[in-house]
Amino acid sequence: MAHYEKFESALIHGGVYGDKFTGAVNVPIYQTSTFEQEGLGQHKGWEYARTGNPTRHAVETLIAELEQGKAGFAFSSGMASITAVLSLFQSGDRIIISKNVYGGTFRVLDKIFRNFGISYAFEDTTDLNSLKERLTEDVKAILIESPANPLLTVTDIAGIATIAKEKGILTIVDNTFMTPYLQRPLELGADIVVHSATKYLGGHSDLIAGLVVVNTEELAERLGFIQNATGGILAPFDSFLLVRGIKTLGVRMDRHVENAFNVAKYLRNHEGVKKVYYPGFADAQGYEINQKQAKNGGAMISFELKEKYNINKFFSSLRLIALAESLGGVESLVCHPSTMTHASIPEEKRQEIGISDALIRLSIGIEGIEDLILDLEQAIAESEG
């Protein structure tokens, strides 16, 4: 990205820009399953669309450039990307995961990869000294989210990467909440970055996609083989939509974050709110670390209402903010982690790591801030009882 002064320019002009054959400023949708070859072993760089497609290549090149990695890979969903990364490991390997991590990541490790002899362990990745002591010989990777889903816990990415390198293991960072606009884990020493591109990168709740970026040619070769062999690739049209979404990432994230900070302040000062989780506050857990490794606190907020408020009535009283799975779209969304995003984690484990039944998670969109606060205000008032 050396030829760009600003990251915002790379969002628009990075990767594969336009179409050299027609002069179109947008990468075309190459809606084809195969490519005609001129002779045996003679082709124009493309053979079969599972192996490679020019539209998918455009988004893969773009995300690699934005995350400053060696290569990028586009998958059919965020979970397909996590699954591909976990396929780098083999029976007997152990993966350390952050205490509060996306429920789908836990589920695929617990219900799928455990069947193949790959084990996992929940650890407090914010405590580097304790973590060091738990890195047994069978640990081959540390998979973290920072800020983590849904308690917005901040982990020192550079610190984790340093410890991991000393042990010869991989650092994997799910960067979905922050995007490369706000945080770039590979620059902090991570080996692999994963995105549910369904979220902020797509940005409009109209596609499902996953992205992976790696920092070495060796990892690129291995992950490229897995992508082709297992086939969970991103389709051309969704690749096109994702490139389009990324072009406006900068302006969208600026508005997302501005709104989130104001909503978080409003909630923090509300007499009916028991606790607010938001890493943009100076007294939040990990604030100083987050300031070093990220541009700001992001646009995700979690909070709890006080006991006298009826959480079901709160959800049903919202008029503008939609009760829905997912996050990162232009519209604000609210969810109940215990019964939605993290329902696959056993209740006792949820309670242990702090995901209470009273926890509410907000993905703040780009609507007018006054409308968002008014909606929250009337919903909280309706739920008082």
Image (cartoon, helix red, strand yellow):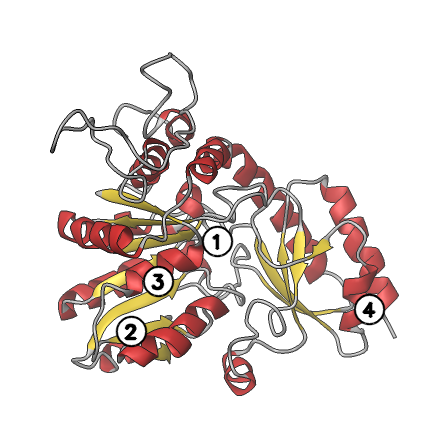
Residue 361: percent from left, percent from top: 62, 62
Residue drawn at the location 72% of the way across and 54% of the way down = 322
Instruction: Report the Cα–Cα distance between label 1 and label 2.
Output: 21 Å
Residue 64: percent from left, percent from top: 29, 40
Labels 4 and 3: the sequence-earlier one = 3
- Residue tagged 2: 95
Labels 1 and 2: the sequence-earlier one = 2
- Whether pointer 4 and pointer 2 mark residues with C-beta atoms closer than 8 Å, the reply is no
Q: Secondary structure at mark 3?
A: helix
Q: Nearer the viewer, mark 4 or mark 3?
A: 3
Q: Which amino acid, by three-letter code, is at mark 2?
A: Ile
Residue 318: percent from left, percent from top: 79, 57
Q: Tell which of 363 and 343 is nearer to you.
A: 343
- Residue tagged 4: 313
Q: Secondary structure at mark 4?
A: helix
Instruction: Report the Cα–Cα distance between label 3 and label 2.
Output: 13 Å
Are there few (<14), some (14-19), or many (20+) residues within 10 Å of tag 4?
some
Labels 3 and 1: the sequence-earlier one = 3
Quadrant in which the C terminus appears: bottom right
Q: Which amino acid, by three-letter code, is at mark 1?
A: Phe
- Residue tagged 1: 177
17 relative to 208 in the view: left or right = left
Q: Tell which of 168 and 198 is nearer to you.
A: 198
250 relative to 110 in the view: left or right = right
Mark linked to residue 83? 3
